[in-house]
Amino acid sequence: MVKARQSRIGPRKPSSRAASSWTLTLTLLVTCSFLILILLALRIFSIPNDHSGLSKPNDLNNIARNTHITEGDLHDGEGRWVEIVSWEPRAFLYHHFLTKEECEYLINTAKPNMHKSTVVDSETGKSKDSRVRTSSGTFLARGRDQVVRNIEKRIADFTFIPVENGEGLQVLHYEVGQKYEPHFDYFMDAFNTKNGGQRIATMLMYLSDVEEGGETVFPDAKGNFSSVPWWNELSECGKKGLSIKPKMGDALLFWSVKPDATLDPSSLHGGCPVIKGNKWSCTKWMRVNEYKI
Ligand code: PD2
Ligand code: ZN
C-alpha cells in the first residue's frame, strides 16, 4: 500500500496567522497616527471644534443663524433676545430692549431741551457747529425719574456694568441729511478720563424706526459684512461697513476696549445720513470707574 506522502510544510497554525495580521494592523495604525500628527503639525488638517454652534471670531454667518432663532430660545419673558453682531468689535444687538412707551417717553422728555450738537473750537475755546455730528441732542441726568431709573437698571443688568459707571442718557435727533461721522467713543486725551476714567462700552438705543439711511456703521469691523441678511436694505453709507438698521426699541451694545483692557480701534463707528424719515436715538456711555454727575 502506497502511503500518502505527507507535506513537510503543512498548513499554518491558526495562532501564527492571527499574530501576523495583528502586526499588520498595528503597523497600519502607527503609520496613520504618525501621518495625522504630521498633518496636524503642518496645519494642513485640523480637528473640528464646533462647540454647540459657537462661531469663529469674524464669522458673520452667525447673524443669519441667530435671526432665525425660534421663539423661546434666547428670548426672555418680554420677547427680548440677543443677537451676536460681531466679535471685532464686540457688538451685540438686544431686540425689544425698550418698550414703545419708554421710547416715546424719552423723546417727549428730551424734546423741549434739544440743542444743535456743537464741538469746541481748539483755537478759540468757543463752541461751534459740528460738521462731524449734525444732529441735535440733550442729556437726561442719571436717575432723574422712575422711567429713566428703570432703563438704567436694565442697562446695568444686561451689560454687567453698575449704574454708577454710566453717564447720563444722551438723546439725539437726526433729520434728513443729518449724520454722525465715524469716531471712537473712547477718549484720547487725559482731561476727559479724569472723572470716571475711560469709556469702555456704549449702549446705543433706537427710539424710532428710520425709513431709509441712519444706520449705525462700523467701517473697520472684521469679517464679511456683506453677508448680513439685511444687506439689500442698506444705504450706500451703510454698505461701507458692518451696519445695523435702527428699529424702535432695539439696543446695540458695543465695546470700545478689548478684553485685555486695551483700546479697540475696530470700534470706530458712525451714524449714516438719514435719507427718508426721522431718527431718534439714545446713548449711554459706560466708564471704567464710578462716574460723578
Ligand atoms: O445716534 C447714533 O446713531 C450714534 C452713532 C454713533 C450715536 C453715537 N455714535 C454716540 O452717541 O456716540
Ligand atoms: Zn459714538
Image (spheres, grey):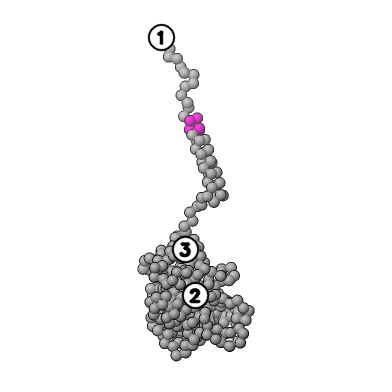
Mark found first going from the N terminus, 2 or 3: 3
Give the residue type at disc 1: Met
| Viewer-nearest of discs 1 and 2 | 2
Q: Are marks 1 and 2 in contact (CB under 8 Å)?
A: no
Q: CA distance from mark 1 to mark 2?
A: 109 Å
Give the residue type at disc 3: Asn
Q: Count the labels in the image.
A: 3
Q: CA distance from mark 2 to mark 3?
A: 19 Å
Q: Residue at x 45, y 77 (%)?
A: 273
Quadrant containing the N terminus in the rendered view: top left
Q: Which residues are magenta?
A: 16-20
Q: Quadrant of residue 277?
A: bottom left
Does residue 240 sit above or below 21 in this rendering? below
Sort mark 1 into few (<14), some (14-19) or many (20+) by Cα contacts within 10 Å: few
Give the residue type at disc 2: Gly
Does residue 42 sit above or below 266 in this rendering? above
Q: Residue at x 57, y 82 (%)?
A: 291
Mark found first going from the N terminus, 1 or 2: 1
Residue found at the very far right of the displayed protein:
190
Does residue 74 sit above or below 45 in this rendering? below
Q: Which mark is residue 1?
A: 1
Q: CA distance from mark 1 to mark 3?
A: 92 Å
Q: Which residue is mark 2?
A: 270
Sort mark 3 into few (<14), some (14-19) or many (20+) by Cα contacts within 10 Å: few
Q: Which residue is mark 3?
A: 224
| Viewer-nearest of discs 1 and 3 | 3
> In the image, residue 230 lies at what x, y percent?
40, 68
> In the image, residue 289 lies at what x, y percent?
58, 78
Q: Is mark 2 within 8 Å of ligand 1?
A: yes
The reply to whether residue 276 is in sight is yes
Q: Secondary structure at mark 3?
A: loop
